[in-house]
Amino acid sequence: MAIGVKVLDRPIEQTSYVRATLKGMALTAKHLLNPQKVTTQYPEQKKPLSPRWRGTHRMLTTEEGKAKCVACGLCPTICPANCIKLVPGEDEKGNRYPLIFEIDEFRCIFCGYCQEVCPEEAIHLGRHYENSEYSRQGFVYDLERLTAQTHPVCEMWDPADPKGE
Amino acid sequence: MTTFIQPLLQVVDPQLPPPSGVVYFVATVIKMLVVFTIYMVGVALLTLAERKISAWIHDRIGPNRVGPGGLLQPAADGLKNIMKEETYPGAANLPLFVLAPAIAFVPALLTWCVIPFASPLPTPWGLIDMVVAPLPVGYLFILAISSLGVYGIVLAGWSSNNKYALLGGLRSSAQMISYEIAMGMATIPVLLLAGNVALNDIVLQQAHGLWNVLGLTVAFLIFLVAAFAETNRLPFDLPEAESELIAGYHSEYSAMKFSMFFIAEYANMVTASALMVTLFFGGWDIPGQWDVAPWSAWKTLATGGFFLFKVMFFLFFYMWIRWTLPRFRYDQLMALGWKFMLPLSLSYIVIMASAILGLDAAGVARGSWMFGLSLLALNVVLVGILLFLIDRGRLISPAYSRLDKRNVDKLRAVAARSSLMAEGRN
């Protein structure tokens, strides 16, 4: 079988170095003199996040400053990544509260099911992305840390308002 | 005693060369220091300029964190490179490995010493030439020294004991030797017009007549392309060729020794730009009354500034080309050098030599407006012919070599029988 050879037979105007070079240089000069401003100077300028951005968690608190969580156990049950550790407790009045509430942010897949399932609107995903720690242990957020977060929280998708208007 | 005192008491005419060797020596040392300082600072700033210009061409912003507008970036880079660890490959030839970066850098610096950068400066001790070493062999010295630059790269490639580095070094030697011929040939018409190889005389000839770029555009174009190849800049940076050879000849280098190759590249660029300006753009010449005696300090300053401006334009041009054109393939590089530039420069020498001889025989005085005008007319015709020939792909082949019609038909017939090709068509 013969070898298939692709024969290039371009029109003669396209085979010249001179025109192509001049054309290319005109293009680069155009960008040099009149650049399109596309850069965001990150630490100083930040792009707005979507209202439905799902970042690291935040636990909302009651007016007394206690976590809203009633330790119902729905969020560790629904969590597909199994990243929430919850040990429920009960005070003398019979109110349930979490003894231990830990989220491993490395295991979390940021699906937002915990926020959706929460009956007390306690656990939320945050509109926040600057997370860095010096150790892996630092990414296991305990209750104290979750309640101390102040960043805005994610707005879940609402079937009545699908476009988030 | 009188014979010793007399030269010191003598009132020296500022418009004449200094009579004493001491003045010459002191002036040379001062010029060396000034030129070296400006040169090295300029080279450092060029690295920043390159990054900024590349950024602007890419619609980016470029380095802007160190100092106002990123101006201290070269200092930060230098500091980083000094602090970094120097690595030595186990199998490298150590003496040559250490020597190579210096050999790459020194010739570029040496070449600069014969380039006149301003009009002569009158001082109470006599007229001082604004060139570090006004050698009578000027241009020949440049040709001799600039060919040494290839040693640094070849030795770096060989002594690293690395196959990629060696390939880079080999490519660079082949490339620089090929283009040096065309470069030297292209400047022969310049020397014919000046009647001398001293660079000062070449500048003065252009100052009194036409800038060589107007009279010898073809030579300028050949010199421009060859200068890009000589300095290993894109589109001729085959010795580096990241996509094929990692980093070519400096793959094994780290820290300040790696930085030296960068400094050498930019130093070479400055020298090549200064050469282009000197040979073709009138050197320090400003058209008008700036380039004739009597000399003054203002004229020195103005001509020096204008020289700097012209050099900077070419440096910008280097960067503009770098961020526009892709790299040549190796065979294209060789074909361009040997099959196109060399015959072109040879035939250009013949044409220009006969033209100058004809004008001399016809009794047209060198430097007269008739002489300049006829050269200009000839030049327009030659450039027209050259552009016509290149533009239609008749002389240099583009990305593929053009087949003649018979071969195309044969290949088409083969392709038509092949089922593989039939699929490719659709």
Image (tube, grey):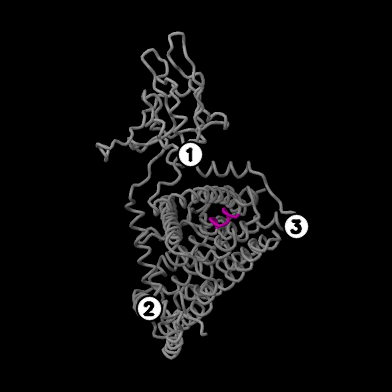
Residue at image point 71% right, 54% down: B89
Q: Chain of mark 2?
A: A
In the depicted structure, whether residue A85 falls above or below residue B40: above
Q: Please tell me whether mark 2 or mark 3 is closer to you in this view.
A: 2
Residue linked to disc 3 = B91
> What's the residue type where badge 2 is placed?
Arg
* Badge 1 density bin: few <14, some 14–19, many ≥20, Cα 10 Å: few
The secondary structure type at the circle numbered 2 is loop
Q: Chain of mark 1?
A: B
Q: Position of residue A55 (x, y in %)?
A: 42, 34
The secondary structure type at the circle numbered 3 is loop
> What's the residue type where badge 3 is placed?
Ala
Instruction: Give the magenta part as a residue range.
Output: B261-267
Quarter residue B177 falls in: bottom right
Which is more N-terminal, label 3 or label 1?
A: 1
Mark 1 to mark 3: distance in Å? 38 Å
Pick the residue in front: A114 or B297.
A114
In the depicted structure, whether residue A72 falls above or below residue A78: above
Question: Going by the image, does A72 lie left or right of B112?
Answer: left
Residue at image point 42% right, 74% down: B218
Mark 2 to mark 3: distance in Å? 50 Å
Pick the residue in front: B294 or B289.
B289
Residue linked to disc 1 = B66
CB of mark 1 within 8 Å of CB of mark 3?
Answer: no
Q: Residue at the top extreme? A: A92
Question: Going by the image, does B189 lie left or right of B95?
Answer: left
Q: Please tell me whether mark 1 or mark 2 is closer to you in this view.
A: 2
User: What secondary structure is the magenta-colored segment mainly?
Assistant: helix
Residue linked to disc 2 = A10
Quarter residue A73 falls in: top left
The secondary structure type at the circle numbered 1 is loop
